[in-house]
Image: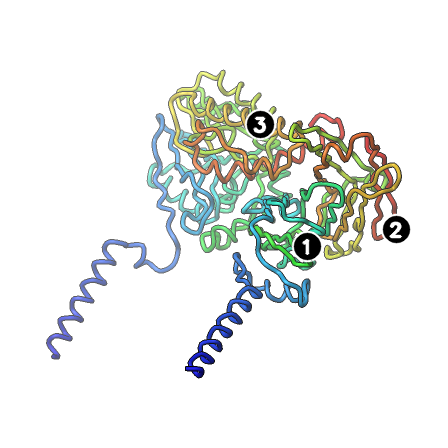
Amino acid sequence: MDEARLECGLILLALVFAIGLLFPWRAEAGEPDYRLAPRQVAPDTWVFVGATEDFSPRNGGNIVNTGFIVTPAGVLVIDTGPSLLYGRQMRQAIARVTDRPVVQVINTHHHPDHFFGNQAFPGLPILALPETVRGETAEGGAFADNMYRMNGDWMKDTEPLAAGPAPVPDRLELGGHRLEFLRLAGHTDGDLALFDRTTGVLFAGDLVFHDRAPTTAHAHIRRWLDSLAYLAGLPFRVLVPGHGMPSQDALPIAQTRDYLTWLDASLRQSVEEGRDMADMLRDPIPARFDGLALVRKEYPRSVSHLAPRFERAVLEGVRP
Amino acid sequence: MPQSLRLGAAVMLYALALVARAGDVAPDPLNSSRWHDVRRALFPGQPVRFDSRVEVTAPATAEDSLNVPVSVRVTGGLEARRILVFAEMNPIVPVLEFEPLRVSPYLSFRMKLQQASPIRAAVLDAGGAWHVGSAWVDAAGGGCTAPGSGRAAPDWQEHLNEVQSRFWSHPQGEDRLRLRISHPMDTGLAASIPAFFLQELVLTDETGAPYLRLKVHEPVSQNPVFSFDIPAEMRAGHRLRLTGVDNGGNRLDRVLE
């Protein structure tokens, strides 16, 4: 009897060890780990590719692409991720690639998944367009409420920290990299894209989504389409979208343009025909957008963002 | 033998009573914790049942808690004397009451939502029974206690109670009317802003005969936009007129072109 009990106990113990080996993060109490693994997309240039998912306690808000460029004059960081923890773990991951210090940070726009890691870069200049600094300041608190609600523990100690007041230059030469700062708009009122002429890498921010439905909470679609046309004309070799896999062709630009053009035309037409938002919510989404992750969630959100503006225009005779 | 008959009758009666009781307290398809309290408060002693002919459409998640689009359509020949819309998790439960006198039993509008809640439409039929349709909307919250952005516009008072409207003719024989009324629709729950909201709207023809009556409560969004469907033959040859009043006694009166 006792022997049998001992045997059971041993088997249980073995099982616990086996589980511990299989799922090592369960063993470490304390901080969750984003497991950030930089992907090299060009010489000196790395990207942290996030999941094409919604914010959740499972992904901790890591649904976004951030990146960095390593130069002899130091490291430039493009966007800081959804939390203080992400920012810190991003710095640790960068330190595993290079021992050069981070010297410069940019925020492509004011959405929380792109700037909530700013706190992890104290004392460093954080460059952003004036519209972005305004948005980060004005909406940071409301974003934080939502981010804590949706991501949970990963957000611990994160406070929105707006980018610094330094003006964004048009060009910057950093350790032999000729960088161009492109002041665009449309996804938000201020979208900063970064083009590295030396490597041909274009960090497009959220002006470009790849196999993921674009989000439109602060969008102005016509300005966005103009920005996409501009980006499509650049001689880039690698395109880093704000969400989705980096690519070596312009396909993500075409994809984003196709979806936005359809969305804009479809909602405008509905409003012009006197249809309600509830009617639009039930409208089918064309099959060619099936491959865009989250399209069924983003489309209803976009109806809420865009239809009221078009409605006003139709009822008041004002152009939106 | 007679004894077993009596027993049988008793069992049948008991079963019938069970069925009747089950009908009376029909389970809420959304399983909301507040449903039974709200049902008792709004429809005391009145028959209430859930009915798929009452279609409530709203997004699964409120992207903007200050502007949640809702539409209600009564189908399947159910006669609608009154339509009561309410959200039981809101601090102010009733949203609006609609009497579609000479228009179709359909309306759409936008509302404020304080937290995740069922949105219900209860339709009163000719026999005095209520038929309820529901939709669940998840919301991050703050809709009722956040000040509306309209207050930030410096000229909102100049435009108070202005009406924009447009008709669309539909091939199905109904004309759609869409209205936008400039009004802050303050709930009184945002700090330092007293309640100030539209209370009543009536659509009439040129003789004053009503087409529809709408009683509006605080949760309707600021600068409300309403849609109604009017059978084309009802509208033909008439000039429709919208009148209304808010809780400050400000009136609106507008002939709709």
Q: Nearer the viewer, mark 2 or mark 1?
A: 1
Colouring scheme applied when the structure was drawn: rainbow
Q: Callout 1: helix, strand or loop?
A: strand
Q: Do the residues at discs 2 and 1 belong to one chain?
A: yes
Q: Is residue B5 left or right of residue A110?
A: left
Residue A181 higher or lower than B203, as above or below:
above
N-terminal-most mark, 2 or 1: 1
Q: Which mark is residue A169?
A: none
The residue positioned farthest toward the front in the image shown: B1
On the image, the x and y values in percent for residue A159 come to: 55, 50
Name the residue beneath numbered marker 2: B249
- Identified at 21% across, 61% down, the residue is A17
Q: Are marks 2 and 3 in contact (CB under 8 Å)?
A: no
Q: What's the amino acid at mark 1?
A: Leu
What chain letter is assigned to the residue under label 2? B
For residue B124, the mark is 1
Q: Which-is-in-front pick, marks 1 and 3?
A: 1
Distance from Cα at disc 2 to Cα at disc 1 = 29 Å
Q: CA distance from mark 2 to mark 3?
A: 41 Å
Q: CA separation, marks 1 and 3?
A: 36 Å
Residue A273 placement (x, y as % from top left): 66, 28
Quarter-of-image position of residue B226: top right
* Image quarter in which the C terminus of chain A is found: top right
Q: Disc 3 marks which amino acid? A: Ser
